[in-house]
Structure formats: structure tokens, C-alpha cells
Image: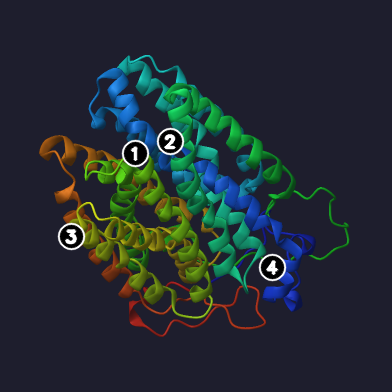
Amino acid sequence: MEKSTSASTMRMGDLMPIADRTAGAEWRRYHMLPIAAALGYATSVIHIYGLGPYIAPISESFGWSRTQTTIGLTIATLVQALFSVPIGLLVDRLGPRVFGVVGVLLTTGAFALLSTATGDKTQWYFLWGLLAVATLPVQATIWTSAVATRFEASRGLAFAITLCGASLAAAIFPLLGTWLIGNYGWQSAVMAQAAIWVAIAFPVILIFFRGAKDRQVRPAPADQPVAQELEGSSLSEGLRSSIYHRLLLASLLFTFTIIALVVHFVPILTDRGADPLKAAGIASLVGIFSIVGRLGTGLLLDRFRGSLVGAVAFLLPAIGCLSLLLAGDEFLGQAVAAALIGLTLGAEVDVIVYLTTQHFGLKTFGGLYGGLLTALSIGTATGPLGAAAIFDEFGNYTIFLWLTIAFMVASSIALASLPRPAYARRPGSRQTQIEPSDPASDGIGPA
């Protein structure tokens, strides 16, 4: 693959020297970056993982069906799907910092505005439309692209910590929202939740979030040599690859089911007899185990073939759904289901992001991952709405749980079928390529 010198090349001051590309050196130099990125990623899903406790109170307040209440989430995620690739391309050109810093303020502010809902459906759509635009600068591409440029030897673990932000959100937001609603009502709870989170996340992101493509506080000396341009497939090469198509399919099927499970997990349990606080407590296990899943997946990705790690992890929610179907109102069965769903929730984006860098490199990571984020967003948009529609039609979530089992098996097969990656790291290289030896590799990789 030809390399060109362009304005996108970076100074040596922006990249760690090749000789220092060890896991220990990366963590000593950039240890706060994945933490800041994790807080940013948690912010990006405040309206997704934080919505569950509000579904019933909002529906009861305005006399809406659960489909009507959750349709705002569909609006927000479809808008994100529409703009994922353009945002990714802008991140490739401008760097992620400006998007992240501004986006955190916009997202929490727009989430707080949901408290002004009056029961008018047009206003409800408008408020979610604002939230949809506000979340564009905080989508996963922003946080992962910064980490990808700073970490290579320990990229799997660095991604895992970054994406633990969603696990943190899944663990904290349902409990925080439920407690605030119980004490102050849902409208005051929305504002309080937004204010609490921005006070925690924004200072850390402002100070520590900076990728290699972002402008440095102090410019590098003028005589410092220019580093090689990041290697990888072009956007058109990636989009034509069957590898990319399989990643798209796995992303779509996974998020359709897993995000719907997370959003509706509290209603699923309360419909089976659990009181709201007990259901929220069980739901928090999803977030807790997703942290275990993310960290464990990150370590496994740094040691084993990523497609196989993902294929195994994507089967766990199928077992979890079987547990929900068989457990009834038993606490143990529900807790096991929450744990298994959490373990996979902790692996999904980690696997997709990691496989994107392994198969296509970093040259156009923002654009290519933006395309995958489109599939993730479409699944996120339609899954919760589909689960709500199934409940409204049948009065329970049983059919949706069986659908989840089928979709998770299919996504696991899509990942297991991937060939050996073309941009796998070898010790001592910054972004090393291996010659593709599998005919199924579609020629993606070095020419």
C-alpha cells in the first residue's frame, strides 16, 4: 500500500518513539487518557443506559405507551447513525479533543432539557432531536481514536478501560436515576443526574483528553523530524471488504439485542414481580460485570485472536436470555442473566474497535469506525423500540428474548468467520503489517 506525505502526518513529538512502544512505557506516559476517555464515553450513553428508570414514570405521567416513551431514543441514535461517517472523517482531520470537550457540555445540557417535557408529543420529539445533535461530538469514534493513536502494545487493554465508561454508565445511571426519581420525581431527577455527571466528567476530560492528532499545548521544535503517516487501508478499500461487511452485520445484530436488553432490563424484571429498587439493583449487575467483561476482553485481545475472543463473548447473552426465560421471578436466575449480559456488554465495542484496527490499520480509522458506528447506532435505535413494540403487542418480553438468542448466535458466527488480520502488531513495531495469507482477506493490507 502506497504511503504519501500529507498535512495529516504527525511530528515525532506527537507519537511515542518506536523504541519506547512497550506496554509499560505507554501506560506511564498516557495513563490518564483512557480514564478521561472512559468518562467521555459514559457521557455519550447517558440517554441510553440512563433511560430505563424513567420509562415507566414518563409513560404514566403522560399516558403514553412504552413505545412512545422510547421513540426519542430511536430518533437520537438514527441521527447519530446518519452522521457517524462524516464525524469520523472530521476526527481523522482535526483530532478528537475539540469534539470531546464541547460534546460533554452539549450532551449533559440536552439531557437536562428532557425535564421540560410537557406531554406534548411534538415537543418530546424536538427535545430528543436536540439531544441527537448534542451527542454527535461524543460518539465512540472520538474517544477510541485518541486512545488508538497513543497505545499499540497495550491497545486492547487501553480500549477496554476506555469503553468501561459504558459499563460505569450501566452500573451507575439506573441506580442514580431510580434514587433521584424516588426522592424528587422524574423531572427534577433528569436535571440532577445531568448536573452531577458533568461535574464529575468535564474537568477530567478537559485536562487529560488529548490524542496524537490533537494540537499540543507546546508545539514541537521546528527541527524535529516528521513521523511516518499512520498505515492502513483507505476508506474505499475498507468499505468494499467482506471483512468489513461481516463486522457491520455483527455490530447491527449485537446492538439491536443487547442495548434493548439493557434499556428494558428494569421493566423486564418488574414485569416478573420484582419491585423497582430490587430490579434496579439487579440491573446494576449488568454494569458491574460489564467492567469485568471489558477488562478481561482487553487482556484477551492483547493475547489471542480477536475474532475468536469476540465470537465466544457474543454467545453469552444467549445463555443469559435462557436464564431469564427459565428463572421466572427467582433472584438467582435473574442475577445470572444480568451477569452474563454484562460480560458481553463489556466486550462488544472493544471487540469491534480492536478488530477494525487489526484488519484495516489506523490511516482512516475514524471514517471506517464511523461506518461501523452507523450499524451500532441503527441497532441501538431500533432494538429498544422493537422490544417496546413487542411488549405493547403481547404484554411481555418473551418473544424478544428468543429473538435475542437467534441474533447473538448469528453475530458470533459472523465474527468467527473472519480471516487472520492484516495489521497485527509484531514486537518492536509501531504499526506493523503482516502479509495476508488467507485468500478471504480480500487483499486488505499491504500491497
> Sequence-wise, which precedes: disc 3 or disc 2?
2
Q: From the viewer's perspective, is the residue at label 4 or at label 3 nearer?
A: 3
**What number of labels is visible?**
4
Q: Residue at x 64, y 66 (%)?
A: 151
* Amino acid on which the number 2 mark rests in the picture: Thr
Res 64 visible: yes
Q: Which residue is denoted by mark 4 in the rendering? A: 228
| Position in image of residue 218 (x %, y %) | 85, 50
Callout 1 amino acid: Pro
Task: Tell me which amino acid carries mark 4.
Answer: Gln
Which callout, 4 or 3, points at the residue further toward the start of the chain?
Answer: 4
Does label 1 or label 4 sit earlier along the sequence?
4
Left or right, 30 with respect to 247, comes to: right
Q: Amino acid at mark 3?
A: Leu
- Pointer 4 or 2: first along the chain: 2
Tag 2 residue: 178
Write down the quadrant of residue 15 in the picture. Answer: bottom right
